[in-house]
Image: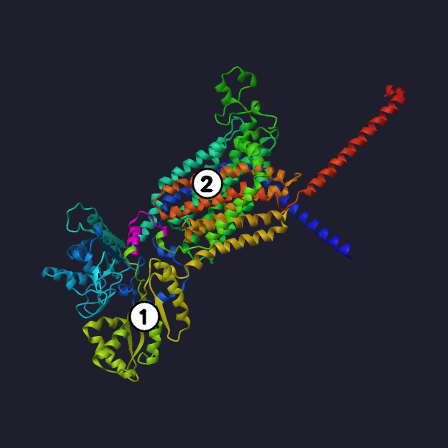
Amino acid sequence: MCLIGGDGASASRILWRMLRQVIHRGLRASFYWLGLFVSRHPVFFLTVPAVLTIIFGSTVLSRFKPERDLEVLVAPTHSLAKIERSLANSLFSIDQSKHKLYSDLHTPGRYGRLILLARSGGNILELADQVLQVHKQVLELRVTYKGFNYTFAHLCVLSHRDKRCLLDDIITIFEDIQQAVLSNSTFHKVPLSYPNTTLKDGRVSFIGHQLGGVSFSPNSRDQQVKFARAIQITYYLRNLSPVVQDIIAERWENEFCALVTRLSTAEAPHPTDQLHIQSLTSFSLWRDFHQTGLLSKGEVLVSLVLVLLAATISSSMRDCLRGKPFLGLLGVLTICIANVTAAGIFFISDGKFNSTLLGIPFFAMGHGTKGVFELLAGWRRTRENLPFKERVADAFADVMVCYTMTSSLYIITFGMGASPFTNIESVKIFCQSMCVAILVNYFYVFSFYGSCLVFAGQLEQNRYHSVFCCKIPSVEYLDRQPTWFKTMMSDGHDLSTHHDSVPYQNHFIQHFLREHYTEWITNTYVKPFVVILYLIYASFSFMGCLQISDGSNIVNLLASNSPSVSYAVTQQKYFSNYSPVIGFYIYEPIEYWNSTVQEHLKTLSHGFNKISWMDNFFHYLRVVNVSASTKSDFISILKGSFLRSPEYQHFTEDIIFTKNPKTDEYDIIASRMYLVARTTEKKREEVVELLEKLRPLMLINSIKFIAFNPTFVFMDRYSSSVISPILTSGFSVLTILILTFFLVINPLGNFWLILTVTSVELGVLGLMTLWNVGMDSISILCLIYTLNFAMDHCAPHLYTFVLATEHTRTQCIKLALEEHGAAILQNTSCFVIGIMPLVFVPSNLTYTLFKCSLLTAGCTLLHCFVILPVFLTFFPPSKKRHKKKKRAKRKEREREREREREREEIECIEVRENPDHVTNV
């Protein structure tokens, strides 16, 4: 029974092996016939891609539109913060209260914001005249629309109480300081505490975001301000009509930026020469985000020229017949026209350009040129004595199976990135566009580039020069010519050595790999150093993976020298002491007069700096010595006296009353207060942590409340949202490789590919973290690309090794390096040369793209040429069975030769014994 079971398992393995071989040979045969079909109709396959490029490329310029809404691109699409924003807006209009919901960079609606910084380390409090001079010029700004002039007074957010423009309280403070100076006093006579200060009208105002770089008077009990470096003033514009008002507000913002530019660049002396002025408006972030695409135009063209040169040089040989410099050039042009076609398809389908799409040409080039160089290497491996059409078909059969597999994995991984699982719209748009680009690249490589290969093969078969396209003279004619002419027109036969049985092996990269590198890397004394190198690589990668940081800051995607980045840096330096103002909205009726509820609210807001009507109301009750422990007393005092006092009237906007028609009493159905947390230099991380602590309380607390700030829309679940594409893509690749274990000829190829890709991915992730790259949308897209780039380059290398039938693993790894090493080196060098110009684009987005792409290429190259050649000589698959089979075949051939010799001896003996028979024959 055991023998039967063993025989059954052995038979099952044989059947699976036969099935895998049938599938593999069927795929090779299919691509062989595809190559034959392309070689028989080269003009058709050359013309169709060219026509498609013209049709779709013409739409790029006519339908080009930029995406103008940054929230749509970089904020999580589905988040609780957006639901909370809708709920908060339904209770208290966010547009009317945005002056209270201070946010660093994500203030809703239209606005203009200034930071006024005292030069040479001066005290901004001593420059009240200059500050108010700037403020006056802002108020006097005029924009014209349809013959009417508009100033800030026509566009500002109005107060409900007196219908006057809402301005920051720091303006009132500086007016008081100016009055004190005019009355021969000093600014110290104006009481100014921090972060809460009491104004002339009795109101308590929070100025933690309006005054920066503060130091206090010694021995002051209420933190009296002695010195301040900067102030921040925001001018809020209202939204009335969706079209007209927005046009006027946009023009006012443009004039606002122009005013700041004039004041900043004016030559001294002028009224504000002691102030350094920076500005931010609602469109500043979008402008500086879109600026990356505009700044990188020249560098992208330089990159294209460099890749064309690198591909041309790397495809050249001294052999003027077999060298194919123009095929390298045409290969890059093939990918370029494929990208133009893909861009046309994107814009025809109502796509809108954003700067994150800048990485698609580089990523598509990295994959497309790999297929081009593999086809060129496959052509060099074909037999020269075959007709050129069959050589093209053999190259297709040899290369296109693996190229199809890697292209499919590209589409699967980026397709998962474009799925509903992805919560970042910019990542989803990029992945959709990348899938289209890969499909078009694949079609153009086997059609357009295949046709170019056919024509180049025909020229080679007819012995035409690979550069000048003229007939190569005969050897006798060349012998009579000068050396320079002989060098230019030589077909390479005189260059062949006893090692070079195939003339194509004279290619300088293949020659270097075969004669020098493979012998060195497989040397026994080199292997220990490679193992140590890998341990160092793994240690740094692991260390980096433990330090992954959140990259949700929008500044990471902006042009580095832009006004928005400078503003954000100054803001972080002087105004990072306090978090954005968090709106605390109680959206269900509660018993505010109940002491237990009051204590509960105090517990929830403990540790925050509060701007609350409740605290002021209870303070008012203590001052007037009145109790309000019942509902009727509480409501009557609140409505009757507290909210009518001048210093407390502004709290009317924070409470929603409703009248009960049955009892004729008022109820509080909703209210709000504002919370501000103390922060340090890591302000953003602390706000994210604060939101994560508040979110569970919102869901389970007995008091139904929400906490909202416009910044939360960009922060809420950003880490999980930005990581999910790489997780889904990685899981999909792992699943595909595991499921295809039984469809490939040797499952160990898939196993090694999984290990290699994992090692490369973790290496890039860890090293990019050590290189100060956070987890933002660009780095995540690069990590998805790393998966594919590693598979693209390691898969042919590994499968050649596991399928090789040489005697030893060392010989197999040498064979794999000789067959695919040249294509890997050509493509990686072109990719690295192509991304080099990105260093000179002054943008954080391109810096991130360059760093991640360089690490991707470097780690992949390290594995293909250093780590795998050494580790594969230690571990399975074993080559002993091939050795045994070859030894058995050799013994069988020796037996056959022995039998043949015995037969010849017998015939000779018979001939000697019967010479007459031989004569008759």
Does any portion of residue 664 appear in the rendered image?
no
What is the magenta range?
Answer: 556-572
Taking the view exactly as shown, the residue that stands out farthest to the left is 183
Q: Main secondary structure of the magenta part?
A: helix
Name the quadrant of the N terminus: bottom right
Above-or-below relation of 699 to 757: below
Along the line of sight, which residue is nearer the eye, 376 or 249?
Answer: 376
Name the residue at the front extreme. Answer: 219
> In this figure, which residue is indicated by the disc labeled 2?
831
Q: Which residue is mark 1?
A: 91
x%, y% of residue 119?
21, 51
Residue type, mark 2 in image:
Phe
**In the picture shown, does residue 484 fall above or below 805?**
above
Q: Is residue 464 left or right of residue 67?
A: right
Q: Earlier in the sequence, mark 1 or mark 2?
A: 1
Q: Is residue 28 magenta?
A: no
Q: Residue at x 18, y 51 (%)?
A: 274
